[in-house]
Image: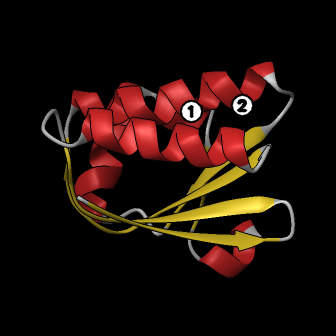
C-alpha cells in the first residue's frame, strides 16, 4: 500500500493506492495517525481511487480514524470509492457514519 499526503487549508488528504488489508493496515494506521497528530489535523479526506481491495482490517483503519477525529471534534470522509471496495463499505454499514463523495472537489 502506497500513501500520498497532501494538505489543503485545515484538511489532510490521503491518497491510498493498493490493497488495504491485514498486511498493510497497521502501517497505514500509524502513518495517518502520525500526520494527524503532528499537524494537529481535524479534517481527514481519504481518497480511495487507487484502492483495489479492502478487507475488515481496512474497515478498522477507517473506523479507527473516525473515532480518533470524533474525540477531537473533527471529521472524516472518503472519496472516489470504487465499486468493489464500495461493497465492503455498504455491507459494513460504514456509509451510515462516514460521508462519501464522488470527487475530491466535492469533499473539499
Q: Residue at x 56, y 32 (%)?
A: 65
Give me the residue at 24% from left, 28% from top: 56
Most extreme residue toward the front is 38
Residue 80 as seen in the image, left or right of residue 86: right
| Image quadrant containing the C terminus | bottom right
Label 2: few (<14), some (14–19) or many (≥20) C-alpha neighbours in 10 Å: some
Q: Point out residue 104 in the picture as x, y percentages from the top left corner.
A: 63, 75
Find numbered disc 2 in the image and state the secondary structure of the residue it sits on.
helix
Quarter where residue 76 is shown: top right
Residue 29 horizontal side relative to residue 54, left or right:
right
Q: Vertically, is 44 above or below 64?
A: below
Q: Position of residue 71 (x, y in %)?
A: 77, 19
Q: Is residue 23 left or right of residue 54?
A: left
Expressed as whole percent of the image width and height from the top left, the position of residue 45 reads 63, 58
Out of 49 and 82, give the one closest to the viewer: 49
Display colour scheme: secondary structure
Instruction: Identify the disc placed on residue 45.
Output: none
Which type of secondary structure does the marked residue at label 1 adopt? Answer: helix
State which quadrant residue 69 falls in: top right
Numbered disc total: 2
Residue, far left: 23
- Residue 69 marker: 2
Residue at image mark 1:
65
The alpha-carbon separation of the residues under discs 2 and 1 comes to: 6 Å
Task: Kindly check if marks 2 and 1 are in contact, taking CB atoms under 8 A apart as contact.
Answer: yes
- Above or below residue 70? Residue 29 is below
Amino acid at each position: 500500500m502506497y500513501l500520498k499526503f497532501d494538505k489543503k487549508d485545515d484538511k489532510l488528504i490521503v491518497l491510498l493506492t493498493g490493497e488495504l488489508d491485514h498486511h498493510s493496515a497497521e502501517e497505514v494506521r500509524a502513518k495517518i495517525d502520525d500526520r494527524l497528530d503532528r499537524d494537529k489535523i481535524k479534517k481527514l479526506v481519504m481518497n480511495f481511487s487507487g484502492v483495489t481491495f479492502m478487507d475488515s482490517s481496512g474497515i478498522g483503519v477507517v473506523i479507527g480514524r473516525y473515532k480518533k477525529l470524533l474525540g477531537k471534534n473533527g471529521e472524516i470522509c472518503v472519496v472516489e470509492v470504487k465499486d468493489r471496495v464500495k461493497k465492503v463499505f455498504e455491507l459494513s454499514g460504514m456509509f451510515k457514519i462516514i460521508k462519501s463523495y464522488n470527487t475530491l472537489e466535492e469533499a473539499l
